[in-house]
Amino acid sequence: MARIIKFEKNDCAPCAQVSAYLDNKGISYESINPFDQPDLAAKFKIRTVPTVLVLENEEVQQRIIGFKPEELATIAQ
């Protein structure tokens, strides 16, 4: 089972769009503010928000930066 992490921060419109999209598709995910967990953000090389990671065994299988519905749709399958 894949683990999905969404790096986001408050007052970020694209972050809210990604959350709404994932919620509408019934995709469960963890929301992490990279400023609250800088070690985790550094581990996954997070440079901007929103960034969605799809992990298998803690390895990044997919990285989606920004609100890109066509890319987000690939994890909704």
Image (tube, grey):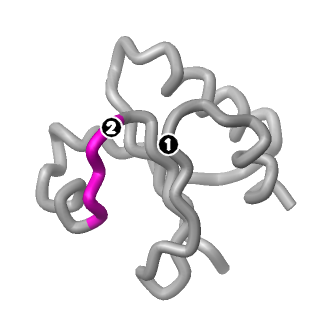
Q: Amino acid at mark 2?
A: Thr
Q: Which residues are magenta?
A: 44-48
Helix or strand or loop: what does disc 2 sit on? loop
Question: Which residue is drawn at the image coordinates 80% and 48% (left, top)?
Answer: 73
Helix or strand or loop: what does disc 1 sit on? strand
Residue labelled with disc 1: 65
- Residue sitting at the far right: 77
Question: Which residue is drawn at the image coordinates 74% and 58% (left, top)?
Answer: 75
Indicate the position of residue 22 as horizontal and vertical percent values: 70, 40
Q: Which mark is residue 48?
A: 2
Indicate the position of residue 1 as horizontal and vertical percent values: 66, 80
Q: Residues within 10 Å of mark 2 (few under 14, many from 20)?
A: few
- Quadrant for the C terminus, please: bottom right
Of 5 and 49, the residue lying toward us: 49
Q: Residues within 10 Å of mark 1 (few under 14, many from 20)?
A: some
- Label the magenta part by its dominant secondary structure: loop
| Picture quadrant where residue 18 is located | top right
Check contact, mark 2 vs mark 1: CB within 8 A. Answer: yes
Question: Which residue is drawn at the image coordinates 55% and 81% (left, top)?
Answer: 56
Q: Amino acid at mark 1?
A: Ile
Question: From what the image shows, is residue 46 above or below residue 66?
Answer: below
